[in-house]
């Protein structure tokens, strides 16, 4: 048997250490990119900031991905994901804005199924605070008081795992028991 010199052992150990460090750095970088793309870091959602006024949503059913629209809420309307109740499209990125002269707006998730942690439905209040919802949340109610209006809602989907999406009733009025700041989606 051939004996390995101390220098060769040292070089082998250095090579092993270098490979481990390089692989760890690459894995961390990949995880950061994935988490950033999916909006895990606060303020990372790529929401529209310019909206086309569509007037009142009252009595209407609108698609969240029909365009970057703003709506006034004085009674009630419905927003739905594209293709609802069939699976929504991959790579969706849609933002709408809602305002009201009432004491707030309440969103009631009549049906809500998105890919948990990967296809977020995000509320952004007028102070820039984001509240993210995903998964199976039928029956969830979220209320936003007038001091946080207008409220933007953003839906974003990735390449795979599309679900049936959502149908959400939007109505004028504030219900403190479902205050958005109390994180009703558990995000």
Image (tube, rainbow, N blue to C red):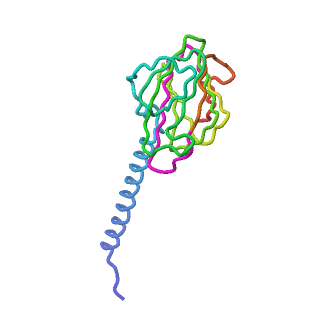
* Figure quadrant of residue 4: bottom left
Between 179 and 23, the residue placed more toward the observer is 179
Between 144 and 8, the residue placed more toward the observer is 144
67 in the magenta segment:
no
Q: Is residue 171 above or below residue 82?
A: above
Q: Is residue 1 left or right of residue 171?
A: left
Residue at horizontal 62%, vertical 42%?
136
Q: Position of residue 58 (x, y in %)?
A: 56, 19
Residue at horizontal 48%, vertical 39%?
40
Q: Is residue 68 left or right of residue 111?
A: left
Q: Residue furthest front?
A: 59
* Figure quadrant of residue 140: top right
Q: Is residue 117 left or right of residue 1?
A: right
- Report the magenta residues as a range: 144-165
148 in the magenta segment:
yes
Q: Position of residue 135 (x, y in %)?
A: 59, 42
Q: Is residue 74 above or below residue 83?
A: above
Residue at horizontal 37%, vertical 54%?
26
Q: Is residue 40 left or right of residue 174?
A: left
Q: Residue furthest right?
A: 177
Image quadrant in which the N terminus is located = bottom left
Between 170 and 147, the residue placed more toward the observer is 170
Q: Position of residue 122 (x, y in %)?
A: 51, 32
Q: Is residue 25 above or below residue 92?
A: below
């Amino acid at each position: 048997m051939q004996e390995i010199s101390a220098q060769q052992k040292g070089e082998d150990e250095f090579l092993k250490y270098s490979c481990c460090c390089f692989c760890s750095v690459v894995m961390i970088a990949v995880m950061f990119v994935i988490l950033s793309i999916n909006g895990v870091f606060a303020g990372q959602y790529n929401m529209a900031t310019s909206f086309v006024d569509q007037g009142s949503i009252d009595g209407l059913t609108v698609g969240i991905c029909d365009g970057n629209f703003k709506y006034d809420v004085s009674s009630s309307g419905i927003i739905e994901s594209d293709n609802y109740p069939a699976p929504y499209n991959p790579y969706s990125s849609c933002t709408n804005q809602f305002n009201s002269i009432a004491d707030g707006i309440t969103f009631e998730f009549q049906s809500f199924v998105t890919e948990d942690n990967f296809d977020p439905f995000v509320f952004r209040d007028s102070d820039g605070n984001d509240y993210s919802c995903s998964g199976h949340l039928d029956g969830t109610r979220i209320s936003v008081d007038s001091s946080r209006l207008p409220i933007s809602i953003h839906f974003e989907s990735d390449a795979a795992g599309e679900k049936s999406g959502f149908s959400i009733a939007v109505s004028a009025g504030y219900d403190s028991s479902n205050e958005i700041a109390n994180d009703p989606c558990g995000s």
